[in-house]
Image (cartoon, grey):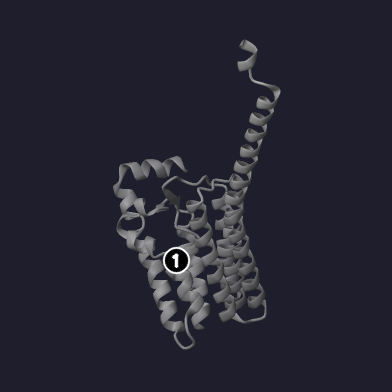
Amino acid sequence: MALAIMPTFKDFSGSTSTTLREGRSELVSMRVRDLIPDILTLAGLQAAMFSMYACQLGDYETSARAFFLALLFDYLDGVAARMLASESKSGELLDRFVDRVTQCVAPALLLSSSSGLPGLVVGAALVTAGAVRLAIPKGVRYFRGAPLFAPAIVIEASALAGYPQPILLVAVLTALTVLPLPYPRSPESAGAVSPLWHLRALPPLIGLIAPEGAEGYAALILISTVIAYILLGPIEPLRSRGGVSDHRKSM
């Protein structure tokens, strides 16, 4: 009677096999969740590379549109990571590297190609700022300094419209990227600029699909949005004692 109710080798074998299958299935699911954002990140890298290629050919408008495509992929990989609950450390490192290529190297190349020595100097400063930011731990709720996309968008929007590069404005924005000012990383911490945060997919779309003849209007909208974000962004974090505390932890 006692022997009849004891588990058999077959029972153990079946249980182990089921556990292994479930483990493999979960592992595959985790890898797929991590892979989708990484694919979007790498697509953004290819768009940034094409932007630099077009810049070398002197086609600054196409270069700018490719940059905005890369920026759109950067937005989409973040959306995908949040939807899939992907928290890959390697994916985060890949994203930060591609961000530097997209938001620092490509705009700096365009700036130096189109604006001579002043553009070269400010472009080198932008790349340096991007490298410095890599060494700074990211805050949970806030960027430390203005986001790197701020000077990048101004450079690319000006190129899109065929305007002379606003070297002084780009230099000021580049300096703000390394100053200890908190800028929101999420709609919850955005405060006064939360409407701009929820519309963050629009700038790359505007730059990418601006119709022929309307590039000037698109550039005006993009540059105005950047300036509004730069001016309003730190207000809520600096008001909030918790925001300042979180910001200091990232320094």
Q: Quadrant of residue 40?
A: bottom right
x 51%, y 66%: residue: 72
Could you say which is closer to the camera, residue 15 or residue 5? 5
**The residue tagged with tag 1: helix, strand or loop?**
loop
Could you say which is closer to the camera, residue 39 or residue 50? 39
Could you say which is closer to the camera, residue 28 or residue 177? 28
- On the question of residue 164 being in view, the answer is no
- On the question of residue 72 being in view, the answer is yes
Q: Residue 94 location, x and y as percent? A: 61, 53
- The single residue placed furthest to the top in the displayed view is 2
x 47%, y 84%: residue: 211
Q: Residue 172 location, x and y as percent? A: 45, 64
Q: Residues within 10 Å of mark 1 (few under 14, many from 20)?
A: some
x 37%, y 61%: residue: 198
Q: Is residue 104 left or right of residue 197?
A: right
x 63%, y 35%: residue: 18
Picture quarter with the N terminus: top right
Q: Quadrant of residue 14?
A: top right
Q: Is residue 53 left or right of residue 182?
A: right
As shown in the figure, which amino acid type bears the numbered disc 1? Ala
Q: Compared with residue 136, is residue 23 higher up or lower down, i.e. above or below?
A: above
Residue under pointer 1: 201
How many circles with numbers are drawn on the protein? 1
Q: Residue 178 location, x and y as percent? A: 49, 54
- The single residue placed furthest to the bottom in the displayed view is 213
Q: Residue 93 location, x and y as percent? A: 60, 50
